[in-house]
Image: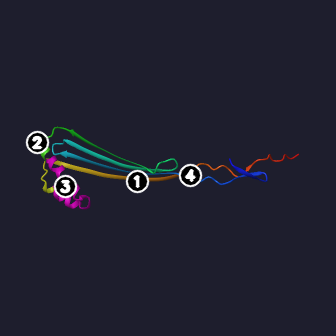
Amino acid sequence: MSCCAIGRYQTPHAPEPVQTTTAAAAAAVTTRRAQIQIVTAEGDRVTLTASQTSSLAALHRDGPGRAGDRDTFVRRSSQSLSLTVEGNLSREELEDIAKLLEVLRKASTRGAAKHPARLARRLERADLDSLSQVSASFQTTRTVAAAVVTAQPAVPPSPVETEPAPVAA
């Protein structure tokens, strides 16, 4: 280290610039789940479960020794579908289930959650005589997280003693 002596301490000529490294990250995850349970007039049970998960993550880094900023983006999605049938479905029950699913599909694209009475009227008009009970649940979960971290190397303490301290007798 280049310095000059002042009394018993060394002081550096000029401090070196402090170099920092910064990283910023953000992530968002959306999960949707729907389950429809149907009981036919004959007591057969049908359960349809669908789920979808989508995620997006971003990372930004910059700091000393890097040739410009670095950005990374990752997008992932997954889907699943499950169908369980307990019993033997007749042709009429299969047709009514197909009608029910079509009514629900149309309702989901038209904001049926805001108008449940409208959905109930559509289901009544669908003429689903072979179905005795229908229940459905829909769930959406969104999670968002973000963080920024800045790091810099440790700076050595100053001033630095060059002569030993006197010893008391």
Type of the residue with mark 3:
Lys
Q: What residue sits right under mark 1 in the picture?
A: 144
Label 4's element?
loop
Precedes in sequence: disc 4 or disc 3: 4
Given contact means CB atoms under 8 Å apart, are the residues at marks 2 and 1 in contact?
A: no
Judge the density around disc 3: few (<14), some (14-19), many (≥20) Cα neighbours within 10 Å.
Answer: few
Q: Are marks 3 and 2 in contact (CB under 8 Å)?
A: no
Q: Position of residue 44 (x, y in %)?
A: 19, 41
Residue visible at 54% across and 52% down in the picture: 20
Residue 110 sits in which quadrant?
bottom left
Q: Which residues are magenta?
A: 96-123
**In this figure, which residue is indicated by the disc labeled 4?**
19
Q: Name the residue that disc number 3 marks.
A: 106
Q: Amino acid at mark 4?
A: Gln
Residue 22, image x, y percentages: 50, 52
Number of the label disc, if any, that sits on residue 121: none
Distance in Å between CA atoms under marks 3 and 2: 23 Å
Which residue in the structure is indicated by mark 2? 91
Disc 4 and disc 3: Cα gap in Å? 58 Å
Left or right for 33, reference 27: left
Q: Nearer the viewer, mark 4 or mark 1?
A: 4
The one nearer the camera, 94 or 160, is: 160
